[in-house]
Each structure stands twice: as structure tokens, then as C-alpha cells.
Image: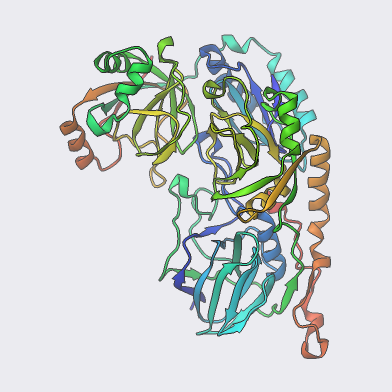
Amino acid sequence: MTSALVLRRAGPGLTLQDGGRTGFFAQGISPGGAVDRLALIEAAALLGCEAGDAVLEMAGVGGLFEARGDLRVALTGAPMRASLNGEPLEWNACHRLREGDTLDIGAAQAGIFGYLALGGGIDVANVMGSRSTHLLAGIGRRLGEGDRLDAGSDPRPERTGLRLEPGARFAGGTVRLIEGPQTRLFDSGTRERFIATAFRRDPRGNRQGARLLFDGEPFRVAGQLDIVSEIITAGDVQIAGDGSPFVLMPECQTIGGYPRIASVVPDDLAIVAQAAPGTVLRFEFIDAAAALDDYRRRRTAGHDLARRVRPLVRDPASIPDLLGYQLISGATAGEDLR
Amino acid sequence: MISQLGLSGMLVSFADRLDEAANRAAIAFRARVEDERIPGIEESATSLASVFLRFDPMSMDHHRLRASLEALLAERDWLAAPLPHGRRLWRIPVCFEGAHGPQLAQAAELAGLEPDQAIAELTAARTRVLTIGFAPGQPYLGILPPHWNIPRQTELTRSVPEGALTVAVRQFVLFAVTSPTGWRQVGRTAFRCFRADADPPFRLRPGDEVRFEAIGAAAFERILAHDGDGTGGAVAEAIE
């Protein structure tokens, strides 16, 4: 029988996500997928699974899960308060669950989006090339009490008890931008003020976009309300009608009428997505060629995962088969997540 | 004009404003790029007056793609390109009455018209699908006469329903999903632009033409009640 996690209590923002759905942009469907792509790569490294597997994305708070059969879970992304049968459970780690175990995942302690992955992935229908829920397109739905997460066939059921040093992205900081088609519609004074401004994450934000707050005059270009509607993509920084920036997330629309001052590079989008309300964000422009070099370097280096994955229990005597963990081969370059 | 759009995208723009020839150019140029099958290009799309190309950032870069696109741009006068083959004319019933057209009077006033005149003009216009986007299968339709160049609202309407017919900047948007918007809702259709379980899931294509036909609230309710496939009483015929 298929192992599964059954939801006994569900937070309000639980959806299944993977690396997204490409090929339907011309029909108005943005790629979607997990807002924190690094969390997918980290979960796959912990489990030794494919980085393209479907995982559970949890916005702000998780839920109460009951294990049906034996399975492995990995917990990545925003660290959330977690316990297994009442005992505290380490985040950024993979764990074994047995039939009847109760996994309780509470509120995020830093960041916003936490991820729960299963060994073998979550078995859910592939719709138009992806298993990700796209609420805007009406593909999939939010999960609730009573829903089941069926585990796929686990390729490495013995591999467990690993932890990982997470990539930094839960405390705001500087976010890299590259120029886009409308950057120069903003005069140089406005662009300089944008770079000099300390923004704070507004509580308003979801899988489509994140609004930023700041002190000072609204950011403006001339003729803002009758600009021609244009293609928009995840990472674009739109200046909304009230003059405040809105950073587009993976489930954004595909066309928008507000001007965009720049685009956040893909590897920094999680810094914005994971910025809890009030977190300070600053921006800097980098050259597109330099941004491409950095993007390629990170993937060629496999996101340093081989170095970051470690045994969960630090006393080697308690791990009889330490050599069997194959720390290196669990790493993935994440190419299938692009 | 060619510009970078994000780390893995390029945008080829034929105009910086709404323009019929630029829209034709975008549709034709996208077809040409698809036909060329440039290695490293993963996806393409058109907007009102431009073509978007998404590429694989591991194997392609903005600089090299720009060179390929410039060569294709030089092949012909794209602004003189014809419309694509296989276009259709759609006639879609729309109800402008009461709560179905909550901002009709406001939009009419901005266009300098009485509501009755506005309905007459909006149903007389034979509009074209300029692009599909924002939400699945959702058309931008135009180009309406110059006095319909009314701005979007500064404040968003919290929600318009699926099927809402909205107007701004000389265009209609026929909403595919329930959504917030800055466009003003003048009517409502029962036409569903996207159904994930249908084949094909998307109804309209860039280049298709659309005429809206006014119906009363009672007729609209009848269509909604008996409309199993989301056609909304619309009919389509081939053009030419």
C-alpha cells in the first residue's frame, strides 16, 4: 500500500508545488511553481531524490500530519516550529516517519514559505507538464483537513538522518537587479533614490507578488496610467498606481500595465519571497552578463550542497552505517529546476 | 527595439504604444522566430506590440540572442506583415444591465457618451484579439475609437467576476478568472476563455475577431443556467 501523510489540521496556505509549468506563457499561464526554488533543491539533496518532485509549500504555518505507512520527510525553506510525536524536530533535515506517527508543523520562525518533501515525491496528477498548483489558472487547489499526500516510490528509503546548512535568504538584505525595457522610463534621480531606499516588506503578499513599503515620495514615471500593457515575468519590480514597488512572484500574471523599474535576478527572488513583514530590503543594479555568470557558476557548483549536507546526529558512534549515506551523490546541480 | 527582460528573457518591441501594424508585426515575427528554431530558445509569446523570448540561461545569453533576432528583423518590413491564417470571427453575448455592468455609466462618461451610445458603439466595434495574457486564455481586444482612450483606475477594483467585460485604453479585456483590476467593468459574458479539462483548453487566438452582442439580464441568466461547456452562447465562423 502507498505510504501517505494525512492532513488532520491545515494552515491556510498549503499548495503542492514543483519547478513550475513552462510552455504556456503565450496562453496567459505564468510558470508558477515553488516561490523558493532553493528549498526544492535542498529537499532533494537531503532525500537523495529528484529536484523536480512535487513538494508541499506552506505559507506562514504548516499543519498536523499523520503518517500512513513508513516514509521519509525533508523539511526546508522557512524554518517552522516542528515536532514528531511531541518531540522537537530539526528543520533543514530529513527524518523517518513510521505508521501512526504525528508530525506537527507550526508557525514560521523566520521567513514565510516552508516546504515539506517526501522520499519519492508527492504523487499527484501532472497537468500540462507540471504537478504544481496554479491558483490563478484554476489548476489544483489549496489543501485542507482530510487531504492525503501520497508518497511516490521512494528510491532510497534507507537514507535518513541528514541535516543541511540552509542557503541564506530569511533575513532580507541586498537584492540584485538587472535593467529591463522600462528602467530608463524612470529618470536618473528616481533610479538613484530607488537604490538608496531601505524598503520594508508589507504584510500584503502572496504567490503572485510582494508589496514593499518605504518612506518618501511615490516612485513615478510620466503617463503611468496609459502605458501600453506589456509582458511581465517573475522577478519584475512593478511600480503600482500608488507609486510603491511590487515584486512579481512565480504565479504572477503574464501581462501587466504598470511600468517596471528592473528585474530581480532569479537566485535573489527567494530573499524577497522569504522576507517576513517588516524585513528590510535594499536593491543594487548589476550588469546582465555578470548576473548570468553568477547564475551559471552556482549551478555548476551544485549550490555547494555536497559541502552543506551533514549527518543529523553528530556522535558518529550512534550512526552505524555512516558510510552508507553517500553524502556527495545526494547533491544535485538543480538543472531540472530551471 | 530589442531589450533584455530578466535574466532569461528578451523583448522585441515594434511600438511603445498601442498600434495595429505593430500588433500584426509581433504576431508575424513570433511565428518567424518559432519557425527558425534557434537553439536555446525555450518559449515565445506576443504582447500587444512585442514578442517575448525565454531562453535557457545555461546555454544562451542576451548578447548572442540579440544578434540572431537582429538578423531575422532585417529580413522584411514586419510592420507590413499580414495577419495569420485560420482566423475566426466570434460573436459573444454580453449583458450591460445593472450589476452586470457596474461601471458602464462611468466609462461612458469618460468617453464623452451617454450609456446607450456607449453600448451602441461597443457592440458595433469589430475588435481583434491583440494578445492573450494576464490570466489563462484571456484576450485583450481592440482597437476601439480614440475617445475610448480612457485611463485605468488609480485604485484597483477588488474583484471582477470571470466573464467580466472591462474597458480601458482603447481596449476590452474579457476576464478569464475572477480578479482584481484597474479596468472598468461595463458588462458581463458567460464565455469561459480557459478550461483545463477541455481540448483545446484555450478558445481564442491572437488575430481572431470578436463582436459583442447586447442581451438582457433574463437572457444572460438563461445562458448561465444552461451553459454546460462555457461557450456562453458564443458562435464562431472562419474568416475568409
Left or right, A215 with respect to B27, comes to: right
Picture layout, residue A24 above or below residue A54: above
x and y, in percent, of residue B183 in the image: 42, 29
How many numbered discs, if any?
0
Front position in the image: B85 or A293: A293
Left or right, A101 with respect to B65, comes to: left
Looking at the image, which residue sits at the far front?
A: A216
x and y, in percent, of residue A191 in the image: 73, 30
Q: Is residue A118 visible?
A: yes
Q: Which residue corresponds to the image point at 42% horizontal and 46% vertical from the top-left?
A: B196
Looking at the image, which residue sits at the far left?
A: B218
Q: Which residue corresponds to the image point at 22% horizontal and 28% vertical from the top-left?
A: B97
* Residue B202, image quadrant: top left
x and y, in percent, of residue A22 in the image: 58, 44
x and y, in percent, of residue B160 in the image: 37, 37
* Residue B138, image quadrant: top left
Q: Is residue B90 visible?
A: no
Picture layout, residue B238 above or below residue A56: above
The type of colouring in the image is: rainbow
* Residue B41, image quadrant: top right
Front position in the image: B70 or A191: A191
